[in-house]
Image (cartoon, helix red, strand yellow):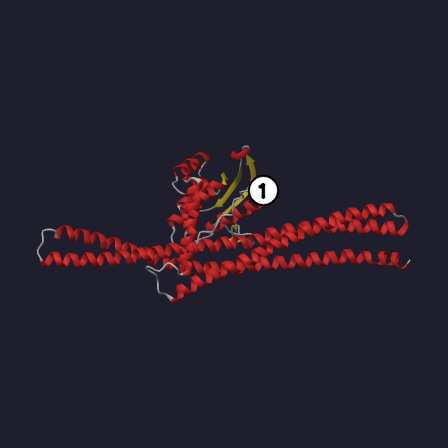
Amino acid sequence: MINTQRSASGSSQSPRSPSLQPYLSVSVTDPVKLGNGVQAYISYRVITKTNFPEYQGPEKIVIRRYSDFVWLRDRLFEKYKGIFIHPLPEKSAVEKFRFSAEFIEMRRQGLDLFVNRIASHPELQQSEDLKTFLQADEETMERLRSQDTGYFKKKPADLMQIFKDVQSKVSDVVLGKEKPVEESNPEYEKLKHYIFELENHLAEAQKHAYRLVKRHRELGESLSDFGKAAKLLGACEGDALGKAFSELGMKSEALSVKLQREAHQLLMNFEEPLKDYVRAVQSIKATIAERANAFRQQCELAETMKLKEINLDKLMLTRSDKVGEAEIEYKELKAESEDSTRRFETIVRLMNEEIVRFQEQKTLDMGIAFHNFSKGQARLASSIADAWRTLLPKLEACSSS
């Protein structure tokens, strides 16, 4: 396993002695808007630092766009069944938000987290597709994307149908509605129930985090408007009262800035991590669906093999001239069935390892997110209290006079 030190943001950091320990550090930086209109997109600098001998050198810088990250995720999901592939940040369908500074930064942060989760994974970091993504030139990546037969080759209507089919399949598998062939494993049932409940609770928490961000912004805007009005009122008055109103306006405007700043921090360090884990759970549900498909395929092949075996026995008893052909079919089917069993067992083993890794990472990330939330709220409350407290003597003097 490759040793990496990770920051709170999810980025991998090289150890103090990189020459003694293998390391792979990736950062997604410098988002730049390219093109115009519907053809416009954001490009990113992806910087890789490593001492892995299979890489081209100690540092490599490439330019990537969102669809390149999608290509990487699709390839990994297809090849590494049983491993939870970290989700990508969402794509904004609203034109006016696509290129806002805030959305671009959220997207950059999410892409950085995505690629570093892969780079720090003991199996995924060995992927040839990851090496290609981190080292290939732009022309090569464009060619690979065009050759891909995944979702990006589908029409919008096809994509919508695929999404509905996947959602339906995942829900049926997780809820146990689809029962033609199903695992009867108590631990597996417990896992499915936990994932379903976790998604609901995370989605609910994220919804209220969104409302908190919105409330902070609205309160900040209201304080800013109130501050301007109070300053104008102060300009109309004279002496102590006018000065008190002016100071009240300035304090309100200063607090407005702090509220807007805290709203941004709340969005980036609290709501977004919660939203990221909602997507992560959906990725786990997709892996659960893959496990269900592998189990179903294994059972179907085993059943078909039994029928073939019965048929072969009958042909041998009757000394049919079709025995040779039936034996070949039986051996091929047996080999296919054994491969299917191995695939299913591999998925089960990997999922057991992945859920432990997921739980550990979730505990760390949620602890950081809620700590940042609490610290930010305490800091904001203290600033608000201090601001109003300094005004009290002057306002009391005005009211007493």
Report whether residue 157 is seen: yes
How many marks can you see?
A: 1
Return the residue found at the far left.
319
Q: Position of residue 210 (x, y in %)?
A: 60, 53
Q: Position of residue 31 (x, y in %)?
A: 56, 40
Q: Quadrant of the N terminus?
A: bottom left
* Residue 325 placement, left or right of 341: left
* Residue 333 placement, left or right of 16: left
Name the residue at 11% across, 57% down: 316
- Label 1 belongs to which residue? 97
Q: Nearer the viewer, residue 393 or 116?
A: 393
Q: Nearer the viewer, residue 207 or 123?
A: 207
Report whether residue 53 is seen: no
How busy is the neighbourhood of tag 1: few (under 14 within 10 Å), some, or many (20 plus)?
few
Q: Nearer the viewer, residue 325 or 25?
A: 325
Q: Quadrant of the C terminus?
A: bottom right
Q: Position of residue 318 (x, y in %)?
A: 8, 57
The amino acid type of the residue labelled 1 equals: Phe
Name the residue at 17% across, 51% down: 328
Against 26, is 34 above or below? above
The kind of secondary structure element at disc 1 is helix
* Residue 81 placement, left or right of 194: left
Name the residue at 85% across, 56% down: 394
Q: Position of residue 123 (x, y in %)?
A: 41, 52
* Residue 30 placement, left or right of 302: right
Asked which quadrant contains residue 179, the reply is: bottom left
